[in-house]
Each structure stands twice: as structure tokens, then as C-alpha cells.
Amino acid sequence: MSAPAPAPANALALSRPLLRGLVLLNLLYAAAIGLLFVAGLVAPDVVFDALGVRHGEQRAALVLGMRTVMVAGLVAAFVVDTVRAGDPFVAGNARRLQAIAWWVLAGEVLRLAIGATAWAASSPAQGLDLDTGFSLAPWLAVLLLFVLARVFAEGTRLRDDLAGTV
């Protein structure tokens, strides 16, 4: 039986370039959504015709719904924070995990709002088809992030208590 491969010396340090790349992709996503939003204001017929919105009595509601989703996409694009290195059991990490939990919760509420907007803007003639169905996984992630934040807060407290007794 062979020994398992050794773990990287500092996985957090190795993940920094990946995180930087993802932050860059997120900013590009925000720029693309912003350009689409502005183009939809400057040349709405060209943009929404290209997006497949048919002319008719429901066009205005569908265009408003799509613009609302674009604004929500811009808001969601800026829900990014940095990850910092250091001792895991510090109060700052517990606060960051709790903040992440709140941001994931806000993202899920925003996703449900986008789904409601798409539903309200749709008509039998043409629907705004977005994949915003309910998924249990993000809600479970929110719960686990809050629990993990509490574990980190308790770990910090216990480590500080231990350091005071030594």
C-alpha cells in the first residue's frame, strides 16, 4: 500500500492566484452585464430584438424584467471579498465566515427575486426563461457557513483561554 501524496505546504497561498483569476472573471462579468444594460438603454430595439424579445403588448413588461435582472446581476457581481492568510482561529476569520454566510443568503434571496421578476414579466406569448429554480444546496451552505463561523468563534475563544492559562 503506497503512502498518500503530501499536502501542499500552504494551500491558501496556492489558492491566491486562482482567487485573483476568479475575481478578474467576476469583474469581466460585471462589465459585460453593465455594457448590455447601457446598450439596452441606448439602442433598446436593437438589443432586445437580438435577445429574441418579440414585439407586442408584453414587450415593455419583458424588457423591464430583463433590465431588472441585469441590475440584479450587477449587484451580485460585486458580492466578492478577499481571503486572507493566517491563523484560522482568530476572531477576524469567524467574522469573515459569518459575512460570507450573509452574502450567500443575500445571493439566494436575490436569485429568488430574479425568478419572481422573470415570472412577473413573462406572458403566455413569450416567457423570460431563466433557470432560477429552487435548490437546497445553497441554503444548506448558508446554514453550514453560520455553523462554521460559530465553530471558529468558539475555537478562538478556547485558544485565547488556553493561552491565558499557560
Image (tube, rainbow, N blue to C red):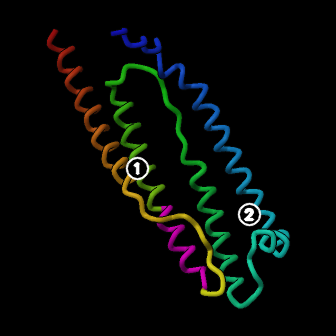
**Residue position marked by numbered label 2 in the rendering:** 37
Q: Which residue is mark 1?
A: 102
- What is the secondary structure assignment of the residue under circle 1? helix
Q: Position of residue 122 (x, y in %)?
A: 60, 80
Residue 120 percent coordinates (x, y): 55, 80
**Extreme left residue here?**
165
Give the vertical position of 71 relative to 53 (above or below).
above
Q: Is residue 48 in the magenta section?
A: no
Quick one: quadrant of the N terminus? top left
Query: Is-magenta flag for residue 121?
Result: yes
At label 2, counting other C-alpha atoms closer than 10 Å, the crowd grade (few under 14, some 14-19, many 20 or more) is: many
Residue 24 shown left or right of residue 154 in the figure: right
Give the residue type that dot 2 points to: Phe
Q: Is residue 147 left or right of residue 73?
A: left
Secondary element under disc 2, as helix, strand or loop, is: helix
Magenta residues span: 110-123
Quarter holding the C terminus is: top left
Question: Looking at this view, is 127 or 117 the one in front?
Answer: 127
Of the numbered discs 2 and 1, the one sitting upstream in the chain is 2
Tell me, yes or no, if residue 41 can be seen here.
no
Point out residue 119 in the picture as x, y percentages from the top left corner: 54, 77
Along the horizontal axis of the image, is 87 left or right of 129?
Answer: left
* Looking at the image, residue 121 lies above or below residue 133: below
| Up/down of 28 relative to 136, above or below | above
Task: State the predominant SS element of the stretch in magenta.
Answer: helix
What's the amino acid at mark 1? Trp
Q: Is residue 91 above or below residue 110?
A: above
